[in-house]
Image: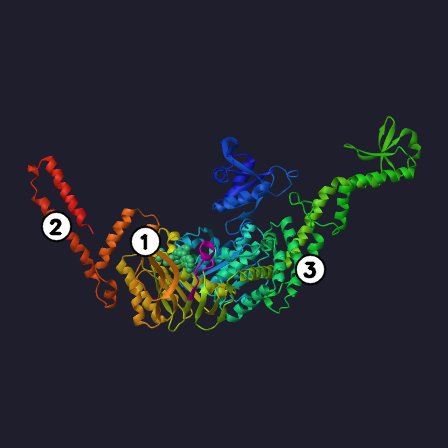
Amino acid sequence: MDTLTPMLRQYQEIKARHDNSILFFRLGDFYEMFGDDARRASSILDVVLTSRDAGKSGRIPMCGIPYHASEAYISKLIKAGLKVAICEQVEDPALAKGIVKREVIRVVTSGTYIDEASFESRYLIAINFTDKLSALAFTDTASGTIQTNEYATLQSLVEAISKIPVYECIYPQAQETQVKEIFKHPLLRAKNITLSPFEDWCFTSDIAKTSLKEHFHTHTLRGFGIEDMPLAISASGALLEYLKQMHKQPIRHLHKIALYADAEHAFISPAACYGLELEGLLAAIDHTLTSLGKRKLKEWLYHPLKSKEEIIKRQRAVTLLRENPHVCQELGKLLQNTPDIEKSISRISCGTGSARDLMALRLTLLKQPDIEKTLRALKSENGLFHLEDVPQIRGLLAKAISPTIPLSHPEGNIIAQGYHEELDGLRDIRENGKNWLKNLQEQEIKRTGIHSLKIGYNQVFGYYIEISKSNLTRVPQDYIRRQTLTNGERYITPELKEFEEKILTAEGKILQIERRLIEEIFKIILDSSEKLSVFSSCLARLHSLYSLGILSVTSGYSLPEINDGFVIDIKDGRHPVVEKSISEPFIANDTLLDTDTNHLIILTGPNMAGKSTYIRQTAILVILAQMGSYIPSTSASIGIVDKIFTRIGAHDEITKGQSTFMVEMSETAGILNNLSERSLVILDEIGRGTSTFDGLSLAWAISEFLAKRKVRALFATHFHELTALSEEFPGVKNCNVSVKEWNDEIIFLHKIVPGGTDDSYGIYVAKLAGIPKEVVKRAEGILTRLELSGNLQEKITNRLPAENQLLLFTRDKNSIAEEIKNEINDLDINALTPIQALNTLHTLKKKIESNEP
Ligand SMILES: Nc1ncnc2c1ncn2[C@@H]1O[C@H](COP(=O)(O)OP(=O)(O)OP(=O)(O)O)[C@@H](O)[C@H]1O
Ligand SMILES: [Mg+2]
């Protein structure tokens, strides 16, 4: 290290404290990276890798990026899974003795990064666990709340994590091994979460409690409902500590801890979120105009309501907007182009607030009165239309922040004219210096009567008044001589000196005063961050309601009736996403489910008929209804659902690496173990990932279980044998999707009709998909033989062992093999000519081919 240049020695010292981050080392107008950092970053960022003289130890790899464009580079590194420590010069280079002092001012990590490009939340979570209990705490950089809860099993912890858009997870270093194990779970593996071990002491519950109480200025945590949850407290405390350490700031916008209460919402299992393609559904129903609104709508979709009153309250608000299209339109205009103020508030709180954030807040807050006025036209008492007002901050920003900040060079132009007298004066000088001098010149000419009096400027003496020789007698007393020329004298006056002082320092002072004022404003904003956060969540809610209002006027949408009963009765329901994506008309279908005589629908039907579409559509319409939305149907009545489970095949793709069947069965186990009487279960082809007999037996047993529990369930299956269940259980109903056979062709009618079916038409679909003719033909042959070989359904209903079935095929094959074996045994190889040998081989091959099933 001694052989390094002093600057690189400073670099090494700082780097040693941040060895798990890429260190951005500020050098003039650049952030430089050295050594391994430079090697890694240059390839990710696509910048040139050079090297720098490192003193006696030779040269060291280096690359750099201009500081003013750093955001884009930071974003790339974060998305590549790295952390970035930003090291700034913390003293004025002009005043520094020796090497300029440098410090890391913040560390950007995956979970603390505020992503401008995406509307999504980026959550950071902390987890902690003991033998008996586990806890998580999480926060989104853009919201002001830490949410936390404890879980009795690791499985529930995993499920909770899998439902949150987590980017980074911190945990006690000592639990590294267990944590790595947990994140191998199929539900988490695909999420690519950055794992950041964190100091164990931060997870000590006493320390955590003290630091939380300090942060929230409270004596107890009782008000947050987590006083008696030491593990949740420790996770929350560690989370806060981590944020403080990364941002090197007190994170003032975090203003509360809330119990992560999933109890208020219908639970959509993680597999269901995926299987029902909620992401695509969101895109199909989204009419929000900003990221703030879109985040809220997504939250509503993933967290449907469970209380009848609350759903109806939302429905009423949406209906009111639907019935007042002018108001709705006006509201849309006002909400449009509102910036993401949640992100602005948190940036200010994390010490990275900028002119843009102040402008965003100003612009948004100023809309408040207009939005309020627009909503008043609805004459509604509905609390959902409430918009929190923050008049002081609004007034302050309206007065203090300039409405037109040039964002390319905001410095010195952020504070509005008329807010600060001294600043106005300085700007005046900066902008009107010439005018002022002209005025002074005129004034002095008048005062002295010297018409040739001139004001000028030079580098050495600054501003001066020049008087020619012939007029020297008329020079006033207060003029101070500075310089003698051949044909005159140059003077200054206190007034001119003061002006000079002012104009030369104006720019510096403008920046200084402005910085001070902005700091003050930031502080006032943070003092009100709680109210501001209420304001922004009201705004987001209005936006979401607006979006549902627009959706409600889509043709063919109706308002479902919501009740506390158990009947789901949908007339002419349609799948909102499939309906949009196909060119031919979508065939509407009814759904009737209850917990009495119609609770398990066994849906059979050919491939491509629309089974999956239909069963998913039912779940999707229930979710939409419970989020307060209108739904694609002519009418519907929904008995509230509290949990939605699905087991849908498509899930396999994202869980590569784990056996398909294993995933299927563990998901199914999750469903069966967590059912409640209000659940809705959607099963798509359970049991297809194993041998037919295993699969069928499992599907049968699972259906029986559901049938006995009288849970509302839809089961799409190719096991026609299951239709026999309806004979045993009166609540089980068979339905199938009708098709029409016509001239060797099959027409899919997509209509759900009562009764089971035997036909699969799988081979027909294969033909449609372009499978070669010879393969299709061969498959048809095989199918015929299989169909002749016995009736599986009979075997199951009569509880006969299925082994006989297997013997049917095997005996056949074996007898041919036996025959051929004997023939070969009888051959005298020495007596055969080559031609004879070939012929014999040919005959044997023929025999095998003609006997193959
Ligand atoms: N009600 C409907 N109206 C119009 N088209 C539909 C309808 N339902 C489904 N379809 C069309 O049929 C296609 C296949 O539907 P789906 O995947 O639901 O069939 P499936 O019966 O589950 O087939 P498989 O047995 O192969 O899984 C859909 O992609 C859609 O284009
Ligand atoms: Mg299907």
Q: Are marks 3 and 1 in contact (CB under 8 Å)?
A: no
For marks 2 and 1, give the one nearer the viewer.
1
The residue tagged 3 is: 392
Task: Mark 3 or mark 2: name the one nearer the start of the chain.
Answer: 3
Magenta extent: 575-590
Q: Main secondary structure of the magenta part?
A: loop
Percent x, y of residue 349: 60, 54
Report if residue 691 is visible in the image.
Answer: yes
The residue tagged 2 is: 818
Q: Nearer the viewer, residue 544 or 617?
A: 617
Residue 589 is inside the magenta segment: yes
**Amino acid type for the residue under numbered disc 1:** Tyr
Find residue 238 and name its label: none
Percent x, y of residue 268: 44, 62
Residue 730 is inside the magenta segment: no
For marks 3 and 2, give the one nearer the viewer.
2
The residue tagged 1 is: 764
Q: Dot 2 lies on which element?
A: helix
**Amino acid type for the residue under numbered disc 2:** Glu
Q: Nearer the viewer, residue 32 or 46?
A: 46
Task: Mark 2 or mark 1: name the one nearer the start of the chain.
Answer: 1
**Amino acid type for the residue under numbered disc 3:** Gln
Percent x, y of residue 637: 47, 70
Percent x, y of residue 609: 37, 58
Report if residue 185 is visible in the image.
Answer: no
Q: Dot 1 lies on which element?
A: helix
Task: Mark 3 or mark 1: name the one nearer the start of the chain.
Answer: 3
Residue at image point 23% right, 67% down: 799
Residue 591 found in image quarter: bottom left
Q: Dot 3 lies on which element?
A: helix
Q: Residues within 10 Å of mark 1 (few under 14, many from 20)?
A: some
Q: CA distance from mark 3 to mark 1?
A: 71 Å
